[in-house]
Amino acid sequence: MIVEQAPAKINLALHVRARRADGYHEIETLFAFLRDGDMVTIEPSVKDGFQLSGPYAPDLVEQADNLVTQAAERFRDIFDLYQPVLITLDKHLPVASGIGGGSADAAATLRGLARLNGIPADDRRLFDCAEALGSDVPACLAGKTAMGRGRGEQLDYTDGLAGTPVLLVNPSAAVSTAAVFRAWDGVDRGSIAEGALLDRALTGRNDLEAPARMIAPVIDNVLNALRAHRDPILVRMSGSGATCFALYSSEQDRHAAARAIRADKPAWWCLESALA
């Protein structure tokens, strides 16, 4: 049995630079990963199977063709390997929430199948699979803090902020990534600065925040709630929303903020974690 973690990702900064002729957008983003997320288990079987567990499993039940099964199919096509497997996705991250849940699950599936078949983790074909599955999947496959360019698939790895306490909050709202990108105003507000990772994050922004807030105004409430408790280092929406995050100087500050938000908004999803 192979077990692979599928950690949540956040965008410390996300600058949208241009619309591309292929329908994608040219972006710059700082990817960072948490210590917590979903889990993918893969084991040999007499026939192929896919099953779900975890609190957010019901949100995926109707999706017979999801990124996990797509990842398995693409892996088989690329590597010409057809051993039947049972894949179990233990789903703890909310769906369509801007923290790369589906991309992380697909990446974990690719890593797990590679381990099961003795394929090195740095095999270029794995990254080819990941790139074909989605813009965030290559970053999730590596699972390292990185500057992403192009669609996000061109990665330059960097260091910094490992162990930083982080709180994720989602107002139980799913937001369409495609809709948010369509609502972007098309203005190039410049690139992410050079320097230390935290400085780059603090001077950066998320260009998708404004269109996401128009689609889901409750995001304003989440950002305000995070700013209201324990003087966080950084508060920002992640990806295309609606999940927002805050970085803290201590676990005590993070926990106090989480406790206050849970008490005020018990229906909101909160995850206390740390950057990997």
Image: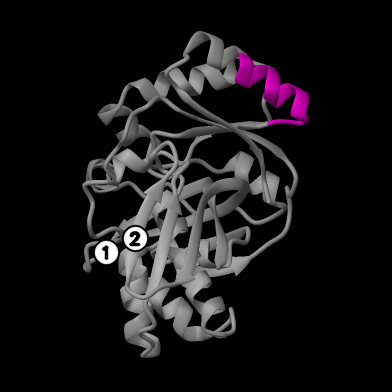
Inspect this view and state whether residue 149 appears: no
**Residue at 68% of width from left, 45% of height from top?**
199
Determine whether the residue tagged by mark 2 lies in a helix, strand or loop: strand
> Residue, x 54% and y 68% (percent of image)?
155
Q: Determine if the magenta segment contains residue 253.
A: yes
Q: Residue at point 53% right, 46% down?
A: 10
Residue 188 higher or lower than 136, as above or below: above
Which residue was labeled with disc 1? 20
Q: Quick one: label 2, few (<14), some, or many (20+) residues within 10 Å?
A: few
Placement of 46 over or under 169, stated as above or below: below
**How far, Cα to Cα, is label 1 from label 2?**
35 Å
Compared with 129, 269 (above or below) is above
- Give me the disc on residue 57: none
Residue 250 placed where, x, y %? 78, 29
Give the color scheme: rainbow, by chain, secondary structure or one colour: one colour
Q: What crowding class fits label 1: few (fewer than 14 Cα within 10 Å), some (14-19), or many (20 or more)?
A: few
- Magenta residues: mostly which secondary structure? helix
Percent of width and height locating residue 54: 44, 41
Q: In which quarter of the image is residue 36?
A: top right
Residue 112 is at least partly visible in this image? yes
Under mark 2, the amino acid is Phe
Q: Which of marks 1 and 2 is nearer the N terminus?
A: 1
Query: In the rendering, at what x and y percent does residue 51 appear?
Result: 36, 55
1 or 2: mark nearer the eye:
2
**Secondary structure beneath label 1:** loop
Image quadrant containing the N terminus: bottom right
Coordinates of residue 78 in the picture (x, y in percent): 36, 86
- The residue singled out by tag 2 in the image is 50
In the image, is residue 240 part of the stretch drawn in magenta?
no
Range of magenta residues: 248-259
